[in-house]
Image (tube, helix red, strand yellow):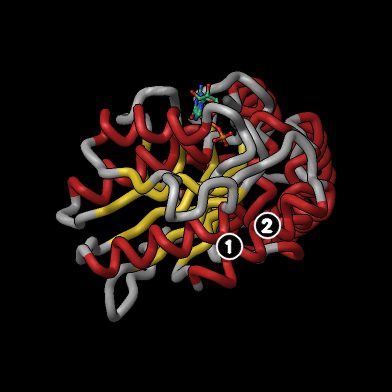
């Protein structure tokens, strides 16, 4: 991810290196290159515009023009701006005052929700929580079994639909799962929900019904970082249809252009909390804007 963007940004700084003083024309040329590099990486246009305007303004400040090595200053400005659009300091999950904390996962089919449920469960367990997973994705034929398999790998129990707790009714499964977590005193309950390949009114309604039934403390929108420009439309549709409190970026190990990762915070205003970086359960980490920015500018 980001290899091409990294190369392009590095190249755009080259022409500044060694210069003792930067003219406005130097800065404008560099900012144009940065702008094109971001657009080619599929970063959303409003995000690119704001980014370019901020860098241009800061790079033309007195501090930069008086610096001994102005190119270094410009690189620092770009780095700080990347950290900013990626969301600055990561925030922690919000845990409920009275457990269980309910975390609902929403997103398109294939985004990586089921995998994430187990990864997050495993991570929470390592942090000393007692999580439970709820298989409320009844759309995809194998989703329940898949969650049971990954749940077992993660050492986290899975509540699956059975006669009596809502076969065929994802809202009933979600509700009974959260009740089970409450009765058995699990501290966190993660509800996996169905997605479709594209945005779909019925699916959105189902997710909204599950949300109303379980009243999540966190609703995490799971976004495949490889989907490029579609990320913005998808994120906006979920923000409107279900609402979410945070974002998880998946497939950051892919070699796509990565624009989704750079756009989602700016477009939705919601923080990216976690990153999924592979198919293994351990390929999962807190999302750190500063680390991601340094990876891009490496
Ligand atoms: P869901 O439909 O949203 O529940 O998506 P799944 O959890 O079933 O994931 C869809 C596919 O993406 C599966 O083959 C996963 O193994 C794969 N996957 C999930 N997360 C990642 C990731 O971070 N990196 C990679 N490379 N693959 C992932």
Residue 242 disc label:
none
Residue 210 disc label:
1
- Where disc 1 sits, the SS reads helix
**Residue positioned 44% across, 70% down in the render:** 217
Name the residue beneath numbered marker 2: 206
Can residue 30 be seen in this snapshot? no
Q: Compared to 277, does 186 lie above or below?
A: below
Name the residue nearer the viewer: 186 or 35.
Answer: 186
Q: Is residue 292 left or right of residue 183?
A: right
Residue 206 x, y percent position in the rendering:
68, 57
Pointer 1 and pointer 2: residues touching (CB < 8 Å)?
Answer: yes
**Residue positioned 36% across, 63% down in the render:** 92
Q: Is residue 124 left or right of residue 247?
A: left
Name the residue nearer the viewer: 244 or 209.
Answer: 209
Residue 256 x, y percent position in the rendering:
66, 23
- Where disc 2 sits, the SS reads helix
Label 1 lies in ligand 1 vicinity (Cβ under 8 Å): no
Q: Compared to 279, does 162 lie above or below?
A: below
Name the residue nearer the viewer: 14 or 7.
Answer: 7
**Residue positioned 75% across, 47% down in the render:** 234
Splitting the image into 4 quarters, where does residue 251 fall? top right
Question: Residue pushed farthest front?
Answer: 163
Can residue 188 be seen in this snapshot? yes
Quick one: quadrant of the N terminus? top right
Q: Compared to 223, does 49 lie above or below?
A: below
Q: Answer few, some or many: residues within 10 Å of disc 2's Cα (few below 14, many 20 plus, some between 14 and 19).
A: some
Residue 223 x, y percent position in the rendering:
61, 42
**Residue positioned 78% across, 56% down in the render:** 237
Residue 219 x, y percent position in the rendering:
53, 61
Label 2 lies in ligand 1 vicinity (Cβ under 8 Å): no
Q: Compared to 116, does 45 lie above or below?
A: below
Name the residue nearer the viewer: 50 or 237.
Answer: 237
């Amino acid at each position: 991810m980001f290899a091409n963007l990294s190369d392009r940004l590095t190249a755009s700084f080259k022409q500044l290196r060694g210069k003792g003083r930067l003219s406005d024309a130097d800065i404008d040329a560099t900012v144009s290159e940065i702008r094109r590099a971001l657009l080619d990486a599929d970063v959303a246009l409003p995000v690119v515009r704001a980014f370019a305007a901020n860098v241009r303004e800061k790079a033309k400040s007195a501090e930069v023009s008086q610096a001994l090595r102005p190119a270094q200053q410009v690189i620092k400005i770009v780095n700080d701006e990347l950290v900013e659009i990626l969301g600055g300091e990561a925030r922690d999950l919000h845990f409920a005052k009275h457990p269980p904390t309910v975390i609902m996962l929403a997103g398109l089919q294939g985004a990586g929700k089921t995998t994430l449920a187990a990864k997050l469960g495993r991570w929470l367990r390592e942090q000393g929580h007692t999580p439970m997973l709820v298989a409320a994705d009844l759309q995809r034929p194998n989703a329940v079994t898949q969650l049971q398999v990954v749940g077992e790998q993660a050492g986290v129990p899975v509540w699956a639909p059975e006669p009596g707790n809502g076969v065929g009714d994802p809202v009933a499964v979600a509700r009974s799962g959260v009740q089970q977590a409450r009765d058995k005193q699990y501290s966190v309950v993660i509800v996996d929900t169905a997605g479709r390949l594209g945005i779909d009114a019925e699916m959105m309604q189902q997710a909204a019904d599950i949300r109303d039934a379980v009243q999540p403390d966190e609703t995490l929108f799971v976004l495949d970082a490889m989907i490029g420009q579609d990320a913005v439309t998808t994120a906006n549709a979920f923000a409107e249809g279900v609402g979410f409190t945070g974002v998880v970026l998946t497939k950051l190990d892919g070699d796509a252009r990565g624009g989704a990762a750079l756009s989602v915070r700016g477009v939705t205003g919601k923080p990216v909390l976690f990153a999924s970086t592979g198919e293994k359960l351990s390929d999962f980490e807190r999302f750190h804007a500063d680390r991601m920015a340094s990876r891009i500018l490496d």
